[in-house]
Image: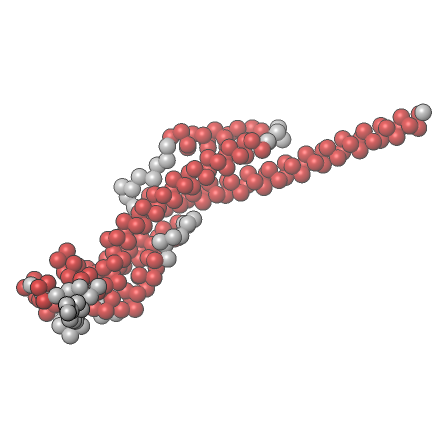
Amino acid sequence: MELLDKAINILYEYSNIEETISRGKSLTRMLDELESSVEELEALVEFTSAFTACCAGLDLTPSVGLVESIYHLLNEMLLKLDDAALESPELNRLSSAIHKLNVHLRVKWEEFVRRSCDDVLELLEVVIPLVGDPSRAWAAVSKIKNFLEKWPVSPEDVSSFTQAITEGKKIIASLNVDNKIRNFLILVANGNASLADLDDDVMNWVKKHRLESRIAITFRGRSHSN
């Protein structure tokens, strides 16, 4: 019987070791998840700082409640890490809060990209045949288009996009394009310009930039009735 008692005690000790190993593996997995969440949060904070620095006046601020919830969750986890008491529910809540922050910042970024493209991209593509160095304009167009669906975005990406927008605006500005000229060029590009669109302001602009031979107005198709 004594031998059996020893065997039982050994089994109990083995069971405790297994439990400790299992708990250690679980903690390792949760620490990996926490590290991944913190890295994502760090990247979002760096993006926000870069975006705010180059786009003054644009408010990226998420709700106070969201920021506070992330802050309190991180503090709570630090305390639990000291006691090796980290649990999955806390990780899930942190991951959910960071996801909400990610969505908020992505929406703000995409709104900014769309507004910037509305102001620059269409007209930039229209004036490419008219500028002295089309390759420069194509390069700006290509860079801008790369960001239409891009996320996540790094601080370097923010800088690259804003530089491309600035370059596009400079190219357009070199042709002194106002709203009337802009509308005329878009009509030409779409094949919808007519002689009626060639008023004195447009003709003076065309002559000033010596574009007479580079802008063509053609016949519009018309239906024939029997």
Q: Is residue 8 above or below residue 126?
A: above
Tell me which corner region of the image, top left, top right, bottom left or bottom right, holds residue 198. bottom left
Residue beneath the point at 29% across and 42% down: 58
Residue 138 image point, x, y percent: 30, 65
- Name the one closer to the observer, 49 or 119: 119
Tell me which corner region of the image, top left, top right, bottom left or bottom right, holds residue 33. top right
Q: Is residue 30 above or below residue 137?
A: above
Q: Is residue 196 left or right of residue 114?
A: left
On the question of residue 164 being in view, the answer is: yes
Total marks drawn?
A: 0
Residue beneath the point at 38% across and 52% down: 149
Residue beneath the point at 68% across and 34% down: 23
On the question of residue 177 being in view, the answer is: no
Residue beneath the point at 38% across and 44% down: 106
Residue 161 image point, x, y percent: 34, 54
Q: Quadrant of the C terminus?
A: bottom left
Q: Is residue 91 left or right of residue 18?
A: left
Q: Quadrant of the N terminus?
A: top right
Q: Is residue 174 left or right of residue 195?
A: right
